[in-house]
Image (cartoon, rainbow, N blue to C red):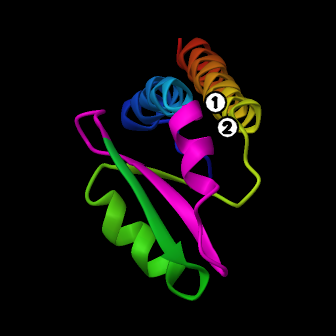
Amino acid sequence: MADLTPEARARAARTIVVAEIFADHADEIAQAVVDLPDDHVLVAVIDHDHQFTGMHQVDKTNLVERVVELEGPGGWAMVFSPGADPDHVRGRTADMADIAGKRISAIDRIRARQAAADN
């Protein structure tokens, strides 16, 4: 069953904010992927306070563990591969915000139907 809680809606709203922060750093992210060693990706991180905390070169074999570690509680991470240019970064962040906006709309719609059915 879908999570329709106020917390899920709030997380989707925060996703939109975070997407804009990643987009604001698109040029910096694109420049950093140029210097990636072989078999590495770039992990850009935003903390729980919505602060861009930097970028990390991560070996692909350790990606899952490192992303969890880098995000920390309530944080966010995006992974970028070599070749990502600023338009690619902005496109992904726009998609991220669009999906979150659709989630908010769906939660609102479903909860409104549920409330109407209860009355």
Q: Name the spot of residue 112 as percent of width and height, x first.
A: 59, 14
Helix, strand or loop at disc 1? helix
Which is nearer the eye, 5 or 36? Answer: 36
Assess whether residue 39 is covered by the magenta stretch. yes
Residue sitting farthest toward the front: 35
Which is nearer the eye, 115 or 108? Answer: 108
Residue at x 45%, y 31% (from the top left corner): 18
Which is nearer the eye, 75 or 34? Answer: 34
Assess whether residue 87 is covered by the magenta stretch. no
Density class for disc 1 (Cα within 10 Å; few <14, some 14-19, many ≥20) is: some
Q: Name the spot of residue 59 as percent of width and height, x first.
A: 54, 81
Q: What residue is shown with label 1?
A: 103
Left or right placement of residue 101 versus residue 10 in this view: right
Q: Name the spot of residue 111 as percent of width and height, x first.
A: 56, 23
Density class for disc 2 (Cα within 10 Å; few <14, some 14-19, many ≥20) is: many
Camera-side mark, 1 or 2: 2
Left or right placement of residue 42 versus residue 90 in this view: left
Magenta stretch, residue numbers: 26-52
* Cα–Cα span, label 1 and label 2: 21 Å
Q: Is residue 37 above or below residue 81?
A: below
Which is nearer the eye, 34 or 101? Answer: 34
Residue at x 27%, y 60% (from the top left corner): 72
Q: Name the spot of residue 65 as percent of width and height, x first.
A: 43, 80
Residue at x 53%, y 30% (from the top left corner): 19
Q: What residue is shown with label 2?
A: 89
Among the 4 quarters of the image, the one containing residue 102:
top right
Helix, strand or loop at disc 2? helix
Callout 2 amino acid: Val
Q: Is residue 60 above or below residue 49?
A: below
Are the residues at dot 1 and dot 2 in contact (C-beta closer than 8 Å)? no
Residue at x 76%, y 38% (from the top left corner): 88
